[in-house]
Amino acid sequence: MAITNLSSTFSYSLLLTLLFFHAVLAQSHNQTKSAFEFLNHLQGCHKGDRAKGVRELKHYLEKFGYLNYNQSSDPIHADDDDFNDALESAVKTYQLNYHLNVSGNLDPQTVSKMMMPRCGVADIINGTARMGSGKKGRNLRGLGSFHPVSRYTFMNGNPRWPASKYHLTYGFAPGTPTAAKGAVSRAFTSWASISRFTFSYIKDYEIADIEIGFERGDHGDGTINSFDGPGGTIAHAFRPTIGLFHYDADERWAVGPAAGSQDIDLETVALHEIGHLLGLGHSDVEGAIMFSSIAPGTTKGLHEDDIQGIRALYNF
């Protein structure tokens, strides 16, 4: 009888364990579903089509600088599912920027590129892209406007830290993981090695020149800069001299993630966002750290294009 009870207890425990791991795996699967997943269902769409999800595509292209319905002659179509002339033009501009076949159609290559996890800073601006009003009473207007120079870009107006501020302090908001602090510190060291900038950590993040932290959803940077859960936009930073850098807390972060994993490298993203903090925009060189997107399970370092960009911006 005791043996029977022991067997029953073991079977029950095993069942609970299996159910637990099933729940964990299911949760993990849901958490890794990209916020850009809607794009998958739009593959093959082109001008003249009406399909569910086209409205979200318009918002995507507006967020990243390819559409501006506030200055459009046809703003009424900003929230419908019609694939119209303005959207086709925006898709063509996106394809041109990423060296894709410029057809205006959502071919597999275009959809694949659009679905990659990416920085929340816009690529280009057709009129407006504002960060709104943020912490510390800083003026956040104008982030995301770029002037193309060679392959790298500068933010609109070439904003720079003044020569008197080539030494910058940085601090971490409460709750920042230790692993992220180490990754960010190493990224600052990398930028210091190829520029005149030096960086030092201070404990009081509220008085630091640069504040780093993890945020979720709408966190006070303005609606256009809200994070979108797992996948999608993974981080953003602000032009000089605002000094704010946010990771999306809903992502799967790691230091030196394994190839093929769904984890995103903390240090690679830090290198990218520090580039924005110093005044660089996005590069169209895929190997550059300032390229707008990054595949999970990959790491990158500073590229010659990044080095040329920062030296050109500051006349080093």
Image (cartoon, helix red, strand yellow):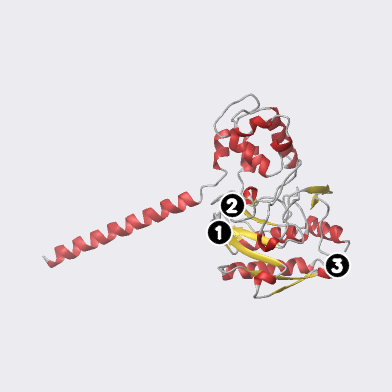
Residue occupying image coordinates x 27% and y 61%:
13
Q: What residue type is disc 1 on?
A: Ala
User: Is disc 2 in contact with disc 3, using a CB cutoff of under 8 Å?
Assistant: no
Q: Residue 168 sits in which quadrant?
A: bottom right
Cα separation, mark 3 vs mark 1, equals 34 Å
Question: What is the crowding at mark 2: few (fewer than 14 residues within 10 Å), some, or many (at least 20)?
Answer: many
Residue occupying image coordinates x 58% and y 53%:
218
Q: Residue 108 sits in which quadrant?
A: top right
Using the image, tell me which numbered label, if any, was put on residue 249.
1
Residue occupying image coordinates x 51% and y 51%:
32
- Relative height, residue 111 to residue 26 (above, below): above
- Relative height, residue 83 to residue 26 (above, below): above
- As helix, strand or loop, the secondary structure at mark 2 comes to loop
Residue occupying image coordinates x 28% and y 57%:
15
Q: What residue type is disc 3 on?
A: Ala
User: Is disc 1 in contact with disc 2, using a CB cutoff of under 8 Å?
Assistant: yes
Q: Residue 76 sits in which quadrant?
A: top right
Residue behind mark 3: 163
Q: Position of residue 142 (x, y in %)?
A: 75, 51
Cα separation, mark 1 vs mark 2, equals 9 Å
139 or 127, nearer to the observer: 139
Q: Position of residue 194 (x, y in %)?
A: 80, 66
- In the displayed orientation, state which residue is furthest to the left: 1
Residue behind mark 2: 227
Q: What residue type is disc 2 on?
A: Phe
- In the displayed orientation, state which residue is furthest to the bottom: 203
- In the displayed orientation, state which residue is furthest to the front: 137
The tag earlier along the polypeptide, 1 or 2, is 2
Q: Is residue 104 visible from the viewing direction of this image?
A: no
- As helix, strand or loop, the secondary structure at mark 3 comes to helix
